Amino acid sequence: MSAARNARGSIRSTGATGLTAVPAAVEILVEGETVTGRAGQTIAGVLLGSGRVAWRGAQHGERGVFCGIGVCHDCLVTVNDVEGVRACQREAVDGDRVEREVRE
Amino acid sequence: MTRVAILGAGPAGLAAAEAALAAGAQVTVLDEGARPGGQFWRHRPGLTDPRMQHGVRRFEQLQSALAGAEVHSGAAVWSVEPGEPGEPGEVGGAVVLRAAVGPADGARREAVVVEADALVIATGAHDLALPIPGWTLPGVTTAGAAQALAKRDGVSVGRRTLVAGAGPFLLPVAQSLALVGSTVVGVHEASRIGALAGGWLPKPWQLLGKAGELAQYAGALARHRIPYRVGSGVVRVLGDERVEGAVVAQLDADWRPRPGTERVIECDAVALGHGFVPRLEAAIMLGCEVAGDRRGRFVVVDDGQRTTRPQVFAAGEVTGIGGADAALAEGAIAGYRAAGVAQDDQRLHAALRVRDRMRRFARRLETAHGIRPGWTAWLDDDTIVCRCEAVAKRAIVERAEVPLRAMRLATRAGLGPCQARTCGRAVEAIVSEARASAAGVAAAGETVDGSSSSAQGGDVGFDRRPLLAPVRLGELGGSDRPTNGEN
């Protein structure tokens, strides 16, 4: 699946909900690349919204979100030089620097 | 004034807080989430679609009640211990909780120590997704993840999602996925019509209060043209670097795939939810009795939601999977009792009635949707069971005869960062089946589970963990001074 398609899916769904206000944007740096999400989203939410589905190296291929509620530790990323942050639990903050991790 | 600590701010914890406050207690709530609501209330006004959320008005009531409590959101509670015994004539069995409070997994979180005269454990449950060949591919998530990402973040993992597993929870997940713009290519319910009829049909009046909700989901499935199949499940996930499709098959009454019924469904995401696992860590750490076996192990409580430890109460999914309405009722009972209100006080009457009705509902859920032992037939020998340590089924079967602890050390199954929260039940099932087959028992049925070591009284299998929540080494220790009630 391409990033563009996923991003469009998210935007379309927002439009269909009849939300009264457009949520503020949040900008984070993912491996040095600026990625825009919506304020209040978790880092996992921002990554998925940008079309990424996997961002951590493991023994048999890549991992992304699995449990989505902080239990499985599949989605770990390094945030602002702190390792082992669960992307599904951490709310994205403007300027967060997010880097991938590898655990084999 | 009685100090009541509440662990968890989902429906059970919030109802407990409301009740304890109403009874005049001093209440401290500790919750790991960034904001109260638990797994149930996660909608974000202005960010996600309000149609995904039930019971918003009740949530608003509970939230306004919280104004009278000390609330620590973003609290990783890593220790719960009995405190000093009370002075003669005072309430004994005090509890001390230690937490790191701040952004999830942050490096410099605040140390919080909460001392209380009574504790309500309302830690809830997480999804149980059974292992399936290919389930480590990106794009496979739990059903709960799909729900959380939709409700909280307004996103879906894929554009075409297959939802599979067991239980009515799959229906709201499918609805949420549709509302965030993913096509749901099907909902595959493993239980067959016979089991569903056995669970749902004999006493339809017990569904009062639930029937409306189920009918609404059925309507949503029809509106979004989502196919719903029973006696069907995902037996393999296909793809190279991410999900490209899934093999579904008909399942027999024991969830064994029927040969020759396999077909491929094109999708880029699979959401799996075969059941729930209660979060028992705090209860086990405190020494509360936990009963059952790997198919359902829960905190033992009496009619007043009291555990077997003095002044420790439990409510919600840790005492049995019953959904939000049951959790709200149990939470209210636990909150009043923890604050010292008598069991026959009239304030408890309504909650007791709801709880008893919802317990019957929970038994029917288990009858209809409970995990059946035949699921292991869809595993290959090299299917990864423990996702953290990439331990395959073969390695677990080869060491099934040794004690569980030795098997874990030899294979590393369940020793990764998630501490067996994800794979524990599956590993126990595979070990139980392998032992049974070695013992010459024909099938891994009821007798097998009854005789396996994981079902022995007091054995908590993979559920005992040294720390309740992941914290960084530097956060252990710190102040012993209680931080609650300081102002």
Image: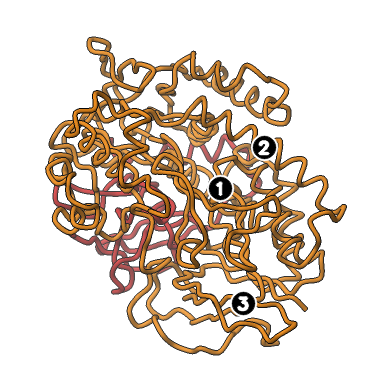
Q: Looking at the image, tell me whether mark 3 or mark 2 is earlier in sequence order.
A: 3
- What is the three-letter code of the residue carrying label 3? Ala
The span from disc 1 to disc 2 (Cα, nearest Å) is 12 Å
Q: Residue at 71% of width from left, 59% of height from top?
A: B63
Point out the residue furthest to the right here: B346
Mark 2 crowd level (few <14, some 14–19, many ≥20, 10 Å Cα)? many
Q: Write down the residue under mark 2.
A: B358
The residue that label 1 is drawn on is B317
> In this rendering, is residue B475 above or below B306?
below
- Chain identifier for the red-coloured part of the image: A
Subunit bearing disc 3: B
Q: Is residue B21 above or below residue B334?
A: below
* Residue topped by disc 3: B94
- Any part of residue B160 in sight: no
Q: Which amino acid type is shown beneath numbered disc 1?
A: Glu
* Mark 1 residue element: helix
Q: Is residue B231 left or right of residue B303?
A: left
Q: Position of residue B473 (x, y in %)?
A: 32, 79
- Colour orange maps to chain: B
Write the residue at 26% across / 48% down. Answer: A54
Q: Are marks 1 and 2 on the same chain?
A: yes
Above or below: residue B271 compared with residue A97 = above
* Percent position of residue A12, x then y: 49, 36
Q: Quadrant of the N terminus of chain B?
A: bottom right
